[in-house]
Image (cartoon, grey):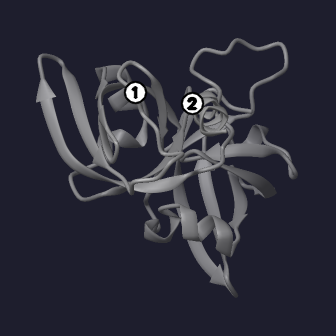
Amino acid sequence: MFTGIIETTGEVIRARHTGGNLDLEIRSAVSATLKPGQSVSHNGVCLTVTEIQAGCHRVTLVDESLKRTSFLKLKEGSLVNLERAMPANGRLDGHIVQGHVDTVARCTKKMVKDGSTLFYFSHPHGNDFITVQKGSVCVDGVSLTVVDATPDSFSVALIPYTLEHTSFSRLNEGDEVNLEFDIIGKYVRRLAQN
């Protein structure tokens, strides 16, 4: 389980396709502290560390993960948001994040306003794709509060700290991001349908 509070960013050093899989080598401030077999959130996707070497770690995405995420757009030099799994005695500073991406969204607008940066996203319409004003959403692994919401779009406002310490610093209109909708909202929706 994760919280959506990003620890650091990592740089993609190598992206290599092996059959239907994508192997990534990532350099980050936490790479040397990781262990093979450990789960780490990469842009909101829970991935297993397969190898540690020279300040870098490796992960592999299978076809199912590639279909549901924006990882096929990653290239050498891309930044990814990283969060290690929450310890059982840790604080839940963000919201409950599973690391299971629901869909990909597209940034439709980026606007600086009074010291914050507003990002607008569109996503496919779906019964489990729920956002509500002042609710939570996980965008590329970052726990954010929804400003405005429609059935197929929403906006978020980032403080300068979040913008500076995540891959949002490089996010522009037209770019794709990974979305994980609030798990509690998905369960409530499912119960209400029954």
Which residue is painted at 77% across and 37% down in the image?
A: 33
Image: 152 above or below 18: above
Percent coordinates x, y for residue 1 in the rendering:
74, 33
- Of all residues shown, which one is farthest toward the bottom? 19
| Residue that label 2 marks | 185
In front: 60, or 92? 92
Q: Amino acid at mark 2?
A: Gly
Which residue is painted at 71% across and 35% down in the image?
A: 84
- Of all residues shown, which one is farthest toward the front? 194
Callout 2 touching callout 1 (CB < 8 Å): yes
Q: Of the numbered discs in the image, which one, if any, rests on residue 132?
A: 1
* Residue neighbourhood size for the residue with mark 2, other residues' Cα within 10 Å, grouped as few (<14), some (14–19), many (≥20): some
In front: 163, or 121? 121
Image: 121 above or below 163: below
Q: Is residue 54 left or right of residue 78?
A: right
In front: 82, or 32? 82
Q: Earlier in the sequence, mark 2 or mark 1?
A: 1
Percent coordinates x, y for residue 30 in the rendering:
67, 37
Percent coordinates x, y for residue 180 in the rendering:
54, 43
In three-dimensional space, the C-alpha distance between marks 2 and 1, rounded to whole angstroms, equals: 9 Å
Which residue is painted at 43% across and 68% down in the image?
A: 73
Percent coordinates x, y for residue 194 in the rendering:
67, 39
Quadrant of the rendered image containing residue 28: top right
